[in-house]
Image (cartoon, rainbow, N blue to C red):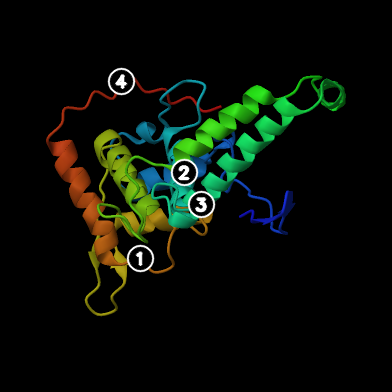
Amino acid sequence: MHKFRLKGNILAKADSPALERPWSRWEEASLSNELLDRIASLVSAKNPSALRRRTFRSYPVDLALMIEVVWSIHHKQTIKFDNITRRQIKQADTIRQLSEELECAIKLSDDSVKLRLQAATARSRLPLDEIGDLAVAARSVAKPSRARISHRPSGTFKHRALDFLVSGLYALIVVEAEGDMTLWQDSGTGRLCGTLPAVLGLLRPYLSGVLPEKIPFSTLYRPIARAKKAHASAKWDLGPLDTNLQ
């Protein structure tokens, strides 16, 4: 995360690593036919071709896209995107203040300075609109309508990405592929058994750092129970399947 320190009118950027997006672009999402076939066999899918489903013909298969979304959810929860903190509000307010001061300084500068600045920019124009937009955005972020500041907001899950993944796997494997999703815990060893832990094991290489090393039984059971209830009370029209892989 970038940290800034103010010294008079000088803005100095503290040394910190660049922020990197931890998931690839969705266009690059891919899973091998071999892996999809292994999952279909593992869950005894009656409609194995559903695991190669594409929501849109030009998109990767849905399971690959699901993994990309899981990465996105995990990243957002890691940086506390959905629950802004006091520290983040203060940072946004600092950006608002600096943006407004910069916009004002440019507007009040001599015409000669404006012309020189404009000539020195890559697009030969002063980014006043962009600076104004940034100030408006920062003002909005710094004054959220309902800021709940806590380490874990009420109504959320500790492993939100995993919860989304399990719910999505239920829809894909049970509803679409007509396979079996099972889960139980060995009373002697405490080891999780069933098709769900096995599928997660196959997907773990694609979710390194997202899936916990040890997953409690209840963490997997709850999203399965919710998914069962949701799909039992809804009529699903999944549309035609496009099973042709690129």
**Mark carried by residue 239:** 4
Q: Which residue is mark 3?
A: 90
Q: Earlier in the sequence, mark 3 or mark 4?
A: 3
Q: Answer left or right for 113 relative to 73.
A: right
Is the C-beta separation of discs 2 and 1 under 8 Å? Answer: no
Q: Is residue 245 above or below residue 72?
A: above
Q: Mark 2 or mark 3: name the one nearer the start of the chain.
A: 3
Between the C-alphas of marks 2 and 4, the distance is 43 Å
Whether residue 44 is visible, yes or no, is: no
Q: Quadrant of residue 101?
A: top right
If the image is split into quadrants, where does the C terminus sit?
top right
Q: Residue at x 29, y 45 (%)?
A: 167
Q: Which residue is mark 2?
A: 142
Of 169 and 163, the residue lying toward us: 163
Instruction: Confirm or deny contact between disc 2 and disc 3 (CB under 8 A).
Output: yes
In depth, the one of 177 and 230 nearer the eye is: 230
Classify 243 as above or below 42.
above
Mark 3 or 1: in front is: 3
